[in-house]
Image (tube, rainbow, N blue to C red):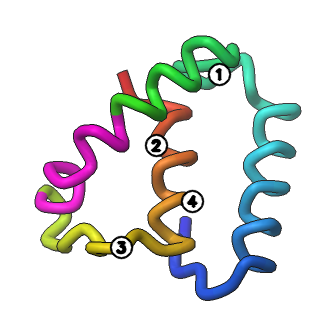
Amino acid sequence: MSLELRSREELVAFLLDLHRDFRERGHEWENNNLDDFLEALAAWVHDSPGAYRNVGEQIPPDGDWAFLARALHAATIYE
């Protein structure tokens, strides 16, 4: 999955794809209800410097569109 988003429009498309994936496979997601999803999202954002280090990248200092997309995607599996 490419998370190289450079615009608001690309973020919107990513979110729509994520929503479609939830409708089709949400039962397979680790965090498949809003409560668990938001808890995982907060946890991943908190731990994101380590997640970036694990893939040899630096967390964007001011965030960016891809950061938000990566955080939302991570919340589908993050514990």
Spatial separation of the CA atoms under disc 4 and disc 1: 19 Å
Residue identified by numbered label 3: 62
Q: Is residue 31 left or right of residue 47?
A: right
Q: Secondary structure at mark 3?
A: loop
* Image coords of residue 13 (percent x, y): 81, 68
Q: Is residue 6 left or right of residue 66?
A: right
Q: Residue at x 28, y 38 (%)?
A: 46
Disc 3 residue type (three-letter): Asp
Residue identified by numbered label 1: 28
Residue identified by numbered label 2: 74
Q: Residue at x 75, y 55 (%)?
A: 15
Q: Which residues are magenta?
A: 44-53
Disc ID at residue 63? none
Mark nearer the viewer, 4 or 1: 4
Mark nearer the viewer, 3 or 4: 3
Q: Quadrant of residue 52?
A: bottom left
- Residue 12, compared with residue 41, is above or below; it is below
Disc 2 residue type (three-letter): Ala
Spatial separation of the CA atoms under disc 2 and disc 4: 8 Å
Spatial separation of the CA atoms under disc 3 and disc 4: 14 Å
Q: Magenta part mainly helix, strand or loop?
A: helix
Q: Quadrant of the C terminus?
A: top left
Q: Secondary structure at mark 1?
A: helix
